Amino acid sequence: MLYGALEAGGTKMVCAIGNENGEILEQVKFPTETPETTMPQIFDYFKQKDIKALGIACFGPIDLRKESPTYGSITSTPKKGWSGYNIVNAAKEALGIPIGFDTDVNGSLLGEVTWGCAKGLSDALYLTIGTGVGGGVMSNGKLLHGMLHPEVGHIRLPLVKGDPGKSVCPYHDNCLEGLAAGPSLKARWGVSADQLVDKKEVWEIESEYIATALMSYALILSPKKIILGGGVMHQEQLFPMIRAKFKELVNGYIITDEMEHLDDYIVPASLNDDQGIMGAIKLAMDACE
Ligand code: ADP
Ligand code: ZN
């Protein structure tokens, strides 16, 4: 059985054909321009394939409320042309097959929970630290939606001592995304994050922001694993720093096996940056049920 997978991002659209084992059989990419130019290319691609369903892991914010008249649309994005675009309805109309739909980060989490490092876990968090910061949450075996969907990148954080705290988030002066996403590193240090590898002070501040946020997520969501992905997390030296600060912040309050083995609790994404597209395959599989 073949499934279509679309990882819809703000800069590129990744389209793939996969099977029920999460294997990606082929993949193409299109730049994200406007819906009118981009989506027909995507639908033409999928029309030529014998797929049973399509899963869409989409940039947001998006409307995931099944009962809503605007279910399936991208809501308040500043990305030109996309605000109000109903990607699910468009896909249904073009392809006439079941469409699975969730956030990009819930997609990545679903990939990891189905085929990756969180396989079989009922409760997990996936956090991406890239151009922005976003997170997918699974709780009691279900992807968390709620009122909208979690927006864990925008929680307010205390400023790290000595950091002037020039947030790049247009909405918040002290949120995690504003202080720790790739563009905030560039704003703070003047060069892009991948050129700062040897600067210890860069990663001291970065890991403190991330660890502080992880403490809140661990306390509120009680995930059994925390997976960190996205471009900035390619800086592997961050992992031991984040774990050490996290441990310090929790300060012995939570006593679980996970807390005893932080190497296995706070982990890198495990699917070679394919977690999002693999999650979209699973969204397609689930849409058939
Ligand atoms: P997106 O979030 O747009 O999907 P990425 O997850 O690749 O894409 O994130 C891009 C951001 O990550 C950029 O701000 C870039 O500077 C940063 N980045 C990419 N690669 C690295 C790296 N190896 N080390 C540190 N930062 C990186
Ligand atoms: Zn913000």
Image: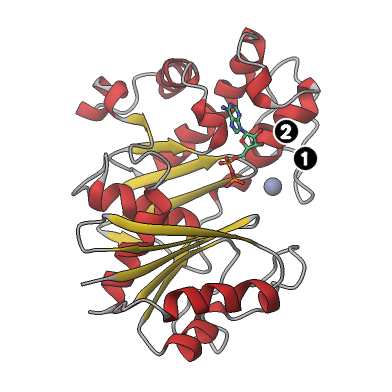
Depth order, front residue of 93/57: 93
Secondary element at image label 2:
helix
Secondary element at image label 1:
loop
Q: Residues within 10 Å of mark 2 (few under 14, many from 20)?
A: many
Q: Split into 4 quadrants, where in the image is the N terminus?
A: bottom left
Determine whether the beta carbon of the residue marked 2 sits less than 8 angstroms from the nearest atom of ligand 1: no
According to the image, label 2 marks what residue?
184
Q: Residue at x 24, y 49 (%)?
A: 115
Quadrant hosting residue 232: top right
Determine whether the beta carbon of the residue marked 1 sits less than 8 angstroms from the nearest atom of ligand 2: no
Q: Residue 49 placed where, x, y %?
A: 36, 76
**Residue 106 in sight:** yes
Q: Residue at x 53, y 72 (%)?
A: 42
**Which numbered tag is attached to residue 8?**
none
Quadrant hosting residue 257: top left
Q: Amino acid at mark 1?
A: Val
Q: Is residue 271 above or below residue 205?
A: below
Q: Residue 85 placed where, x, y %?
A: 65, 79
Q: Is residue 32 left or right of residue 90?
A: right
Q: Residue at x 77, y 51 (%)?
A: 171
Q: Is residue 199 above or below residue 66?
A: above
Depth order, front residue of 114/70: 114
**Which numbered tag is attached to residue 168?**
1
Q: Split into 4 quadrants, where in the image is the C terminus?
A: bottom left
Tell me the distance, in whole angstroms, between the alpha carbons under discs 1 and 2.
6 Å
Q: Is residue 231 left or right of residue 188?
A: left
User: Sequence-wise, which precedes: disc 1 or disc 2?
Assistant: 1
Q: Is residue 267 above or below residue 237?
A: below
Q: Residue at x 50, y 63 (%)?
A: 149
Depth order, front residue of 81/174: 81
